[in-house]
């Protein structure tokens, strides 16, 4: 049996809180656009799929707020296709990724209307597509003449709402920290499998948690983790950030690893820590 080490990390930073919900993670970019234009798709491929607590299936561009500054002129466009719903998670994922996403990305190739398409959502009765725009009239014209309607359905309603702080995106569409982590878990699993990993085998999985500069909280966390049968690899300060690294044997299929990451995240929250990443070795036959 050979083990090949790969360190696959989830780098996470805190994003601003909304009145109803808190965004927990945000990818950072060196450059942002001005408030006079919105970058469409193509600057980064960072779409995530998840099932929300209220039963909706959501495909969302998780990087858009890192590329676009909120401003007073921004408007949220909601396109609703009634009767285009789906009850199965697997079917919804296929529809959103293979049918809906290509349709809305084809619209985003034309930047004249200064719009960005940020998410698509399905429940049992309808499909909804969300975009942010500075030019509602141009966006509406583009939607109506595009392949979008013909490819998805003609029973469409369009509504617009001022949303300069992106509250709809943040509170209604963006995954909470648990669903965000599950998305990242799935990505790591896919990367491991691409290297030949067998996820039904037990892996030694290391988890990193940050505690700002609070060494006492990190040490208390580590002590509690020991009682939960975790091995404490490290508690140290680096560049003003205190980190704790703990490890435990686990399978790396999505169900098994998500149970573990949820457990560690709950434990980290108890001591004021923030879950950062996990890594493991590739396990081959």
Image (spheres, grey):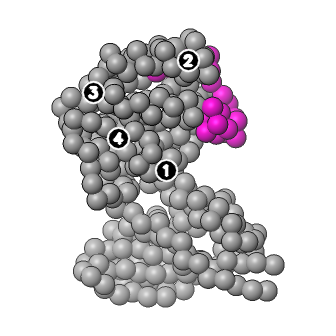
Q: Quadrant of the N terminus?
A: bottom right
**Which one is nearer the viewer's eye here, 113 or 19?**
113
Give how far across and how far down residue 172 sits, in percent: 41, 36
The residue wearing badge 1 is 45
Give how far across and how far down residue 39 sits, in percent: 35, 41
> Which of the marked residues, 4 or 2, is nearer the chain's N terminus?
4
Please state the extent of the stretch shown in magenta in the rendering.
79-99
Considering the numbered disc 2 on the image, is that residue within a helix, a strand or a loop?
helix
Q: In the image, is residue 179 above or below residue 89?
A: below
> Which of the marked residues, 1 or 2, is nearer the chain's N terminus?
1
User: Image point 41% across, 30% down: which residue?
Assistant: 110
The residue wearing badge 3 is 134
Q: Answer whether residue 87 is magenta in the image.
A: yes
Q: Answer whether residue 52 is magenta in the image.
A: no
Considering the numbered disc 4 on the image, is that residue within a helix, a strand or a loop?
loop
The residue wearing badge 4 is 39
Mark 3 residue crowding within 10 angstroms, few (<14) / some (14–19) / many (20+): many
């Amino acid at each position: 049996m050979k083990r090949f080490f790969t360190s696959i990390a989830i780098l996470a930073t805190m994003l601003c809180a909304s009145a109803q919900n808190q965004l927990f993670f945000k990818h950072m970019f060196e450059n942002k656009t001005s408030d006079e234009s919105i970058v469409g798709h193509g600057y980064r491929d960072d779409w995530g799929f998840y099932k929300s607590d209220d039963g909706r299936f959501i495909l969302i561009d998780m990087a858009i707020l890192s590329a676009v500054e909120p401003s007073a002129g921004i408007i949220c466009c909601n396109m609703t296709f009634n009767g285009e719903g789906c009850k199965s998670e697997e079917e919804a994922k296929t529809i959103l990724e293979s049918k809906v996403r290509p349709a809305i990305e084809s619209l985003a190739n034309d930047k004249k209307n200064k719009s960005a398409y940020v998410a698509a959502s399905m429940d049992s009765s309808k499909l909804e597509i969300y975009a942010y725009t500075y030019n509602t009239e141009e966006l509406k014209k583009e939607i109506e003449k595009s392949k979008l309607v013909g490819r998805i359905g003609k029973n469409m309603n369009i509504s617009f709402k001022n949303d300069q702080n992106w509250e709809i995106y943040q509170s209604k569409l963006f995954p909470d920290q648990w669903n965000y982590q599950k998305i990242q878990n799935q990505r790591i699993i896919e990367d491991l499998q691409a290297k030949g990993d067998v996820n039904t085998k037990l892996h030694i999985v290391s988890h990193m948690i940050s505690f700002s500069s609070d060494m006492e909280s990190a040490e208390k966390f580590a002590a509690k983790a020991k009682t939960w049968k975790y091995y404490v690899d490290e508690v140290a300060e680096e560049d003003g950030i205190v980190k704790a690294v703990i490890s435990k044997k686990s399978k790396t299929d999505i169900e098994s690893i998500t149970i573990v990451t949820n457990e560690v995240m709950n434990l980290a929250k108890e001591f004021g820590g923030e879950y950062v990443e996990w890594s493991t070795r590739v396990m081959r036959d």
